[in-house]
Amino acid sequence: MTSRFALLRDGSPEWADCERALTAAGLRLPLPHRAGWSTARRGVTSRCIALRSPDGCWAAAIGLQVAASRALPGFRVLRVERFGEGVPPALWPDAVRHWPR
Protein backbone atom coordinates (compact mmCIF):
# COMPACT_ATOMS: atom_id res chain seq x y z
CA MET A 1 0.00 0.00 0.00
CA THR A 2 1.41 3.39 -0.93
CA SER A 3 0.31 6.36 1.13
CA ARG A 4 0.56 10.09 0.66
CA PHE A 5 2.05 12.00 3.53
CA ALA A 6 2.03 15.48 5.03
CA LEU A 7 4.58 17.04 7.37
CA LEU A 8 2.56 19.00 9.94
CA ARG A 9 3.95 21.65 12.29
CA ASP A 10 3.17 21.93 15.99
CA GLY A 11 0.17 24.10 16.67
CA SER A 12 -1.26 23.54 13.19
CA PRO A 13 -4.99 22.90 12.90
CA GLU A 14 -4.23 20.10 10.41
CA TRP A 15 -2.43 18.09 13.11
CA ALA A 16 -5.42 18.39 15.44
CA ASP A 17 -7.81 17.49 12.60
CA CYS A 18 -5.71 14.43 11.75
CA GLU A 19 -5.69 13.32 15.38
CA ARG A 20 -9.48 13.69 15.66
CA ALA A 21 -10.03 11.71 12.44
CA LEU A 22 -7.74 8.90 13.59
CA THR A 23 -9.47 8.75 16.98
CA ALA A 24 -12.87 8.58 15.27
CA ALA A 25 -11.54 5.70 13.14
CA GLY A 26 -10.48 3.82 16.29
CA LEU A 27 -6.72 4.52 16.13
CA ARG A 28 -5.53 6.11 19.37
CA LEU A 29 -2.20 7.90 19.22
CA PRO A 30 0.34 7.62 22.05
CA LEU A 31 0.87 10.86 23.99
CA PRO A 32 4.14 11.86 22.23
CA HIS A 33 2.34 11.72 18.87
CA ARG A 34 -0.58 13.96 19.86
CA ALA A 35 -0.99 17.57 18.83
CA GLY A 36 -1.13 18.88 22.41
CA TRP A 37 2.06 17.11 23.51
CA SER A 38 4.28 19.83 22.02
CA THR A 39 2.96 22.35 24.56
CA ALA A 40 4.23 20.15 27.40
CA ARG A 41 7.81 20.06 26.08
CA ARG A 42 9.42 23.48 26.22
CA GLY A 43 12.42 24.08 24.01
CA VAL A 44 11.59 21.14 21.74
CA THR A 45 9.95 21.61 18.38
CA SER A 46 7.44 18.99 17.32
CA ARG A 47 6.44 17.80 13.87
CA CYS A 48 4.02 15.16 12.68
CA ILE A 49 4.33 12.87 9.70
CA ALA A 50 0.72 12.11 8.81
CA LEU A 51 -0.12 9.46 6.25
CA ARG A 52 -3.22 9.38 4.09
CA SER A 53 -4.66 6.21 2.63
CA PRO A 54 -5.25 5.98 -1.14
CA ASP A 55 -8.87 7.10 -0.57
CA GLY A 56 -7.65 10.36 1.04
CA CYS A 57 -8.53 9.59 4.68
CA TRP A 58 -5.97 9.98 7.45
CA ALA A 59 -4.43 6.54 8.06
CA ALA A 60 -1.62 7.11 10.59
CA ALA A 61 0.46 9.75 12.37
CA ILE A 62 3.95 9.83 13.84
CA GLY A 63 5.09 12.58 16.19
CA LEU A 64 8.70 13.76 15.92
CA GLN A 65 10.63 15.88 18.38
CA VAL A 66 13.24 18.13 16.77
CA ALA A 67 16.04 19.51 18.94
CA ALA A 68 19.48 20.99 18.42
CA SER A 69 22.31 18.50 18.82
CA ARG A 70 24.61 19.20 21.75
CA ALA A 71 27.29 16.89 20.32
CA LEU A 72 27.25 18.30 16.78
CA PRO A 73 26.60 22.06 16.80
CA GLY A 74 24.49 23.17 13.86
CA PHE A 75 22.82 19.77 13.48
CA ARG A 76 19.39 18.68 14.62
CA VAL A 77 18.30 15.45 16.22
CA LEU A 78 14.95 13.89 15.29
CA ARG A 79 13.45 11.65 17.94
CA VAL A 80 10.43 9.37 17.68
CA GLU A 81 9.05 7.93 20.89
CA ARG A 82 6.92 4.79 20.74
CA PHE A 83 6.96 4.28 16.98
CA GLY A 84 4.42 1.80 15.77
CA GLU A 85 1.58 2.34 18.21
CA GLY A 86 -0.03 5.02 16.04
CA VAL A 87 0.75 3.29 12.76
CA PRO A 88 -0.86 0.09 11.51
CA PRO A 89 1.90 -2.46 10.70
CA ALA A 90 0.95 -2.49 7.01
CA LEU A 91 1.93 1.21 6.82
CA TRP A 92 5.32 0.96 8.56
CA PRO A 93 7.34 0.88 5.29
CA ASP A 94 5.52 3.96 3.96
CA ALA A 95 5.93 5.77 7.30
CA VAL A 96 9.69 5.21 7.47
CA ARG A 97 10.17 6.09 3.79
CA HIS A 98 8.77 9.59 4.41
CA TRP A 99 10.92 10.54 7.41
CA PRO A 100 12.76 13.82 6.92
CA ARG A 101 16.34 13.42 5.75
Image: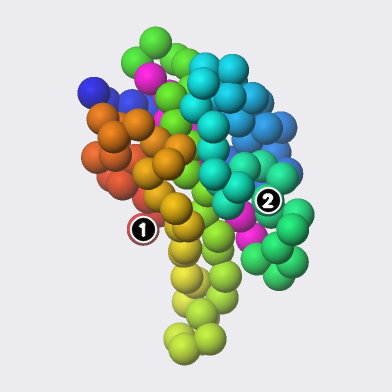
Magenta stretch prevailing secondary structure: strand
**In which image quadrant can residue 22 be found?**
top right
Amino acid type indicated by mark 2: Trp
**What is the secondary structure assignment of the residue under circle 1?**
loop
- Look at 62% across and 42% down and name the residue there: 34
Q: Is residue 52 magenta?
A: yes
Q: Quick one: label 1, few (<14), some, or many (20+) residues within 10 Å?
A: few
Which of labels 2 and 1 is toward the front? 2
Nearer to the camera, 2 or 74: 2
Question: Which region shows up in magenta?
Answer: 45-53
Residue 75, given in percent of the width and then of the height, sits at 48, 77
Which disc number belongs to residue 101? 1
Q: Name the residue under label 2.
A: 37
Percent position of residue 1, x then y: 23, 23
Label 2 CA crowd tier, 10 Å (few <14, some 14–19, many 20+): some
Q: Which amino acid does label 1 sit on?
A: Arg
Residue 80 magenta-drawn? no
